[in-house]
Amino acid sequence: MKIGVFICHCGENISSTVDCPRVAKICESYPGVEYSVDYKYMCSDPGQNLIREAIQLYKLDAIVIGSCSPHMHERTFRNAAFSAGINPFMVEIANLREHCSWVHDDIESSTLKAIELVRMAIEKVKRDKPLSKINVPVTKRVLVIGGGIAGIQAALDVANAGYEVVLVEKEPSIGGHMSQLSETFPTLDCSQCILTPRMVEVHQHPKIKLLTYSEVVKVEGFIGNFKVTIKKKARHINEDLCSGCGMCISKCPIKKKAYNSFEEDLAFRSAVYIPFSQAIPNIPVIDETVCTYFQTGKCGMCLKVCDRGAINFDQKDTVMVADIGAIIVATGYKLYDIERKSADLKYKGYGEYGYGKYRDVIDGLQFERIASASGPTSGEMKRPSDGKEPKKIVFIQCVGSRDDSKGISYCSKICCMYTAKQAMLYRHKVHDGEAYVFYMDIRAGGKMYEEFVRRAIEEDKVKYIRGRVSRIYEENGKYIVKGEDTIAGMPVEIDADMVVLATAMIPQDNAPALARTIGIPYDKYGFFNESHPKLKPVESTTAGVFLAGACQSPKDIPESVAMASAAACKTIILLSSDTLEREPVVAKVNEDLCAGCFYCQKVCPFGAVEVKDVKDINGIVYKEVAFINQGVCQGCGTCTATCLSKSIELSGFNNEEIFAEIAAL
Amino acid sequence: MNLLKEVFMKYGYFPGCSQTGSAKEYDISLRKVIEKLGVSFDEIEDWSCCGATSAHVTNHKLSTALAMRNIMLAEQQGMENIIAPCAACYNRLIMSQFEIANHSGIRKETEELLSASFQKDVKVFNVLELFLNIGIDKIIENRKRELNDLKVACYYGCLLVRPSGLTKFDDAEQPESMEKIAEATGAKTIDWNYKVECCGAAHSIARRDIVVDLSKKILDDAKYHGANVMIVACPMCHTNLDMRQRVMKRTYPEHEDFPVLYITELIGLALGMDEKELGIDLHFIDFNYKDLVPENSGVG
């Protein structure tokens, strides 16, 4: 076997602490090495040419690159090798940057380490076997989870490209948080006016199957070939018969037993309800927990008044299974709750702001409902406790966000903008009112964003105070807001009528559970992880699963929409071919050795291990062995390490190869 | 079982300087009350300053070493649990323990200074934790009278529940443990706004004006919410809230006297002791439970 060694300087990233020419020189003398060279940028076009030419000139069978992490350029070098006629899996990378030059400063010892790393790769590549890509078929149907603006946008884009979409929303209506907003920054256009036409479009689109009041309970399979189990919760209304007349709602005798979550608990709703008047679909839901019929067996008023006979108390949850090719996750966010939490929860709440006991200390979404023309006050500025118009209002930014002591280090990103908008809306509605904003910094990066904040300050006379609020308490119907003005260097005290907290954006409660169901990673807060923060921002690390909107990190509407369209585009690319190529680095079971203990099945994080019957010549099953679905296997090697009978081998990382590497040390 | 309890109920006692001077009545009442509740303690022999204010604002090393000297003595004298009734002492002791546990450099330096090495984990309790350990039921069991006519504002001040990562027994912003203990005496407690606000603390010496303003706000809020007495568990708070009411009156002539008791004195009253016995007569603002009892009620 003839091996070529290519040592990259990575500009000065490697060469400043590793003597690259020396590494290349020494490698020349290793058995099997035909050619060894160093170069300033191996990944560049001339660098790749150098590799290709050397392969052809010296008739190389395998190559070793000493460069950056394989995460970065393994694919680049494999493609280069392939184009010069050798199998792309006969390429090994010795990580001389992240594993060596970046983490050491002594030139002599890091050069010696680099030599060892390259030698290990040489020994491995000698034992590498050519592998070929795996082809899998593709189901041309997309699942979108979450019917907020991101999910709506993604569903419409995919459907308009001609592919089928299943849109699953856990609430009775699509629309998400955007449907709750009053007006949107920086243009102040009405949120519902721009959203509801898109909701209708989703509903009427022939390619979109809309499943509201439904949840994804199980995801099996792999890219191009998912099998998704969806639970459709019982509405107790026959969707085919209901005309959405609303008679059941107006006659329901239960009026004040359940808070209206669409109104952020600022109003009540009946037991049979639609979340809001523009809901899509316009079909009510009966809430079993408060409905008199379900609690006592009496009433049935809705049944009597429905002239279409759509009420069905006996309706049960139904479960369906869909074949899906790709998944877009767009489950959005919720707001940090300032209420007292038990000590073991990571979010500690805000005792200094009363742990939620003051009714006029509200959060941003509650303010949106108060400011909204369709909200509980019909858009009039009224505070929740006594319905009086607040004459002095305080907005506090960064409540939860950027505060390690409250469990969240990140910036929620949208609060600076929506606080400015809310303060502006308040001033437009209450001309003699005073609006104060406590802020840490103003982060208004975005088109027309900074100008918008300046407008709030200069035209609408919103008073911005730089500093934190240490305490809020009630005194004579006023809320005393004690804080610090760090520019004046003075404590400040404001006797406000209402306080609006820009609480942090956090993932939905069930985000980690859903992530585990789908098999995608999430961060310590529960936000879903993208595959690469810069170059793969909408892909999850699981092939065929894409991310859109605030489920990945806090985002405003334009960003969510952009991300949704990007995810849709990636999905369309995926569905555009009939088969998919997969990396062949997968585990394989030696059926003769497998004892059928299925420990591998227990540890496999991707559910790739199946049970296979082994039959004798007469077709009689004489043992069960593990079988690894090559389409699902991600090549992590967990099964290989777990297998007691050493009967699983990971292609490209088999025992012989790994031991040779270790022995070369 | 009883035997085990007896062993557990033995505490080391770190009085701190206040207990021997300005807060003598806190010391007196604490000793009497816990004796009645069947708990005993041994004073740490040869204890010294806890390293509070004057030390910790000037020399970090000195303040840590001073605090740890007392912990070291307790350890050497075989004490596993000690009580520090003063909130400042309590704070200094647990803060120093935290630093020793988390910074090997400070630990080494302090051990060198004291020529000792810290082996065991000595647990430091404040008075609220002590009563929670003893048990609310024990107070109710031994109660000789119910203090029904008291409406108590429980004042924690800044140090007792902070920093929240270290004082893990109660919530730092909306604490409730003192209320639980106070209610065991039959008294009612009020919900009010200033229970963890600052009283001005050591500014009492150099900037009396600050202390007067801050302490007056605390007393006023308690009155506004219907309290007729305030209880504290800190000698510094007591000095500011009780003694400084005289100066307060000079600045704010409309100010009316408002009694401030130590939590131990309140429990003492419930256990049947009288004001004099508990040292309440040593306060600047007079307090007599009988004065609060309506004449025709026949109680007291």
Image (cartoon, helix red, strand yellow):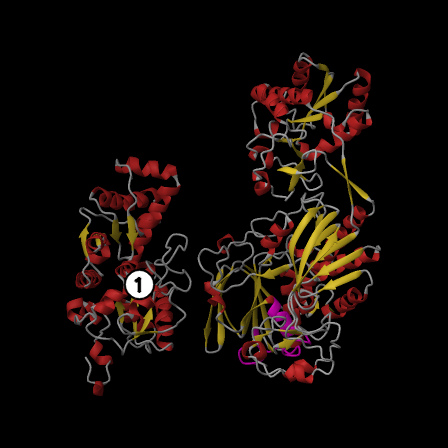
A337 up-or-down from B253: above or below:
above
Quadrant of the rendered image containing residue A170: bottom right
| Left or right for A49, reference A123 | right
Q: Amino acid at mark 1?
A: Cys
B30 up-or-down from A22: above or below:
below
Q: Residue at image x 65%, y 16%?
A: A22
| Left or right for B256, reference A426 | left
Quadrant of the rendered image containing residue B279: bottom left
A50 up-or-down from A635: above or below:
above
Visible residue check, residue B66: yes
| Left or right for A586, reference A139 | left
Measured as percent of width and height from the top left, residue B235 is found at 27, 61
| Subunit bearing disc 1 | B
Measured as percent of width and height from the top left, residue B89 is found at 29, 53
Taking depth in this image into account, of A544 and B164 the one nearest to the observer is A544
Q: Residue furthest left?
A: B277
Main SS, magenta residues: loop
Q: Quadrant of the N terminus of chain A?
A: top right
Taking depth in this image into account, of A124 and A530 the one nearest to the observer is A124
Q: Which residue is mark 1?
A: B237
Is residue A366 within the magenta segment?
Answer: yes
Taking depth in this image into account, of A57 and A161 the one nearest to the observer is A161
Measured as percent of width and height from the top left, residue B87 is found at 30, 57
A305 up-or-down from B230: above or below:
below
Q: Within 10 angstroms of label 1, few (less than 14), some, or many (20 or more) residues?
A: many
Q: Residue at image x 17%, y 64%?
A: B36
Measured as percent of width and height from the top left, residue A614 is found at 66, 36
Q: Quadrant of the C terminus of chain A?
A: top right
Is residue A538 within the magenta segment?
Answer: no
Part of the protein shown in magenta: A365-392
Visible residue check, residue A17: no
- Which element carries disc 1, helix, strand or loop? helix
